[in-house]
Image (cartoon, rainbow, N blue to C red):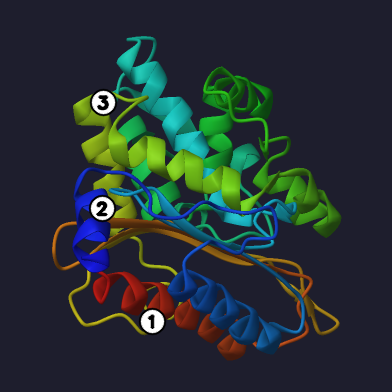
Amino acid sequence: MHVKTRLVFLRAGFAVLTLCNNGLCGSGSSANLQKQFETIAKAAKGKVGVAVELLESRESVTLNAQEHFPMQSVYKLPIAMAALHQVDERKIKLEQPIEITTNDFAIGMHSPVRDAHPLGTTLTLSNLLQQMISASDGTACDVLLRLLNCPSAVDGYLRSLGLTNIVVATSEKEIGQDELAQYRNWATPEAFNVLLRRLSEGRDLSASSRQILLQFLTDTSTGPRRIKGLLPAGARVAHKTGTSQTVKGLTRATNDAGIISLPDGRHLVITVFISDSTADTATRDMVIAKVARAAWDHWVNLP
């Protein structure tokens, strides 16, 4: 009878547990998942923040989810949403051509656009969005920030959504010149999961803009060993990664955040941020992969 009652609650869309301040939830199995996160996180040799939520029931399990973490390229997701919002408002157009000059190049940052066009080029807004999200291109990011009239415009867009714990304050070029500048673009895992939830539910963008962005996120080529690393082959994941350089053995940001489609059609939103880590690349990636797999196993096995 207890199991049947619990199933009714789940199907009615109500969470069967409440998220406590320390990240522990009322269900024993969910508390066990949070303990798994704690154990997995130790290998990172740094600070690890996790937020995972089953959208259909709003059941959540977290670890350090209210702490501040540098986003690195994960911040390109809210930039894309701000740009697509302006498309929906008919202030800019997806097909409009945008000139990219050598002054726009994000030196010291990952940029396939810069590398392919050393003298500059012209791309449509749609192409820039694809390069920024799917390839995590730093130059495309800065050109879009210029088009949107500086990072503060993106920050203002986030405030309009009621999100105060995601801050966009600087550009790729500035981060490339000063590695500490990346701490100015920060988020809590909890807040970033709210943004992912809003995107998944289609609350802030038109249906066409949402579909475009989710496809770009699904086509992401970076971080294949992070959220997707230990999931079953063919698992659908729309995600955005973020990675800092490693300087003197310290990596300030190793991140991945996205939406996982479960086999039965339910969805997990997941944010995993690792900051100030002394572990190597393979270990940091594996921490994120193990967190995602633990969440997958938990909810796939939960009716």
The residue that label 1 is drawn on is: 229
**Split into 4 quadrants, where in the image is the N terminus?**
bottom left
The correct choice, above or below, for 296 with respect to 265 in the image is: below
* Residue 149, image quadrant: top right
Image coords of residue 58 (percent x, y): 39, 48
Instruction: Kindly report which numbered mark, 2 or 1, lies closer to the viewer in this rendering.
Output: 2
Amino acid found under the numbered disc labelled 2: Leu
Q: Nearer the viewer, residue 255 or 164?
A: 164
Asked if one can make out residue 20 in the rendered structure from this viewpoint, the answer is yes
| CA separation in Å, label 1 and label 3 | 34 Å
Q: Quadrant of the C terminus?
A: bottom left
Q: Nearer the viewer, mark 3 or mark 2?
A: 2
Residue at 18% x, 62% y is 4
Name the kind of residue labelled 1 in the image: Gly
Q: Could you tell which of marks 2 and 1 lies nearer the N-terminus?
A: 2
Residue picked out by circle 3: 95
* Residue type beneath disc 3: Glu
Residue bearing the label numbered 2: 10
Q: Nearer the viewer, residue 176 or 123?
A: 176
| Residue positioned most to the front | 1
| Secondary structure type for disc 3 | loop
Instruction: State the CA–CA distance, disc 3 to disc 2.
Output: 43 Å
- N-term-proximal mark, 1 vs 3: 3
**Badge 3: how crowded within 10 Å, few (<14), some, or many (20+)?**
few
- The residue lying toward the viewer, choosing from 56 and 199, is 56
User: Which residue sits at x=48%, y=39%?
Assistant: 195
Q: Is residue 303 left or right of residue 75?
A: left
Q: How many marks?
A: 3
Q: Which mark is residue 213?
A: none
